[in-house]
Image: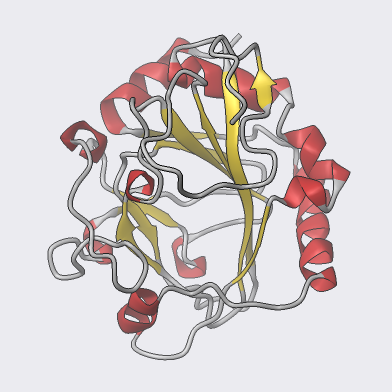
């Protein structure tokens, strides 16, 4: 049974941090799984150009799209009722559909930031029943570049973004330091609307910050454009797809 207070907080603020959704040992195992997957892949750095401007110097980010195709552990986690029941409660539907997944690791001392943005700018849908969950597999205090959010910003709809440098909001108008840091512990999961303005700081600590993102939606929320396709997109994580469309 999902605490009704989570939904109320989410609707008011556009995000909610669920403490201890995973146990510490589980989180540690998934941390190792993330680094194992990244170790087997050809290294690429997806740091946005605007993030380098924000950082004022060289930073680094490691990532992997669609982790469930490289490790069965992630396929298991994304259909775990502990996660999908919360996702369903926040969307207000019994049906939860996959959009995409992504591992993000910010290396120690120079982990790249993300300027403030809305996920909706990257893949708009016909309704706002689209959300994300960030699983924390190690602690994420402010010095490790934790996620920062603007509470209530989801109520303003889709805002104009700057395309150059990674589809971000104007840096001067949306400074990262003005946003609320959401510090988390290993096992915590941060849920937020794809309209919530958010970003994250530089990891200046001596330990990597390891997270896994699952972007999910109500299957009746249709993509506006044919963008951001991913392997497995449209897979049902909970319930059914009443639209019976192919993607």
Residue 239's x, y, as percent?
65, 12
Is residue 154 left or right of 172 when viewed as pictured? Answer: right
Quarter of the image that includes the N terminus: top right
**Farthest residue toward the left?**
173
Identify which residue is drawn at 46% across, 90% down.
58
Identify which residue is drawn at 33% across, 33% down.
14
Residue 73's x, y, as percent?
84, 43
Q: Is residue 95 above or below residue 52?
A: above
Quarter of the image that includes the C terminus: top right
Identify which residue is drawn at 38% across, 82% down.
52
Residues 38 and 55: in front is: 38
Which picture quadrant has residue 179?
Answer: bottom left
Residues 112 and 28: in front is: 112
Is residue 70 left or right of 142 when viewed as pictured? Answer: right
Identify which residue is drawn at 23% across, 58% down.
161
Label total for image: 0
- Could you tell me if residue 211 is visible in this image? no
- Could you tell me if residue 115 is visible in this image? yes
Q: Is residue 18 above or below residue 149?
A: above
Residues 74 and 83: in front is: 74
Residue 93's x, y, as percent?
49, 11
State the colouring used for the structure image: secondary structure
Which picture quadrant has residue 18?
Answer: top right
Q: Is residue 247 above or below residue 8?
A: below
Is residue 91 left or right of 36 when viewed as pictured? Answer: left
Residue 115's x, y, as percent?
33, 65
């Amino acid at each position: 049974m999902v605490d009704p207070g989570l939904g109320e907080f989410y609707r008011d603020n556009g995000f909610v941090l669920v403490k201890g959704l995973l146990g510490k040992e589980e989180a540690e195992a998934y941390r190792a799984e993330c680094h194992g997957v990244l170790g087997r892949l050809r290294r690429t750095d997806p740091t946005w150009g605007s993030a380098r401007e924000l950082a004022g110097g060289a930073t680094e980010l490691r990532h992997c799209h669609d982790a469930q195709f490289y490790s069965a552990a992630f396929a298991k986690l994304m259909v775990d009722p502990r996660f999908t029941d919360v996702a369903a409660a926040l969307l207000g539907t019994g049906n939860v559909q996959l959009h995409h997944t992504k591992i993000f690791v910010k290396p120690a001392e120079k982990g790249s930031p993300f300027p403030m943005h809305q996920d909706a700018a990257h893949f708009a849908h016909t309704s706002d029943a689209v959300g994300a969950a960030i699983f924390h597999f190690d602690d994420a205090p402010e010095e490790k570049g934790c996620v920062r959010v603007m509470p209530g910003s989801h109520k303003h709809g889709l805002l104009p973004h700057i395309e150059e440098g990674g589809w971000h909001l104007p840096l001067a108008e949306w400074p990262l330091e003005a946003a609320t840091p959401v510090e988390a512990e290993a096992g915590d999961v941060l849920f937020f609307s794809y309209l919530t303005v958010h970003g994250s700081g530089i990891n200046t600590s001596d330990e990597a910050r390891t997270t896994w993102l699952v972007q999910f939606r109500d299957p009746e929320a249709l993509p506006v454009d044919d963008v951001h396709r991913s392997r497995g997109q449209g897979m049902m994580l909970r319930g059914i797809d009443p639209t019976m469309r192919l993607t």
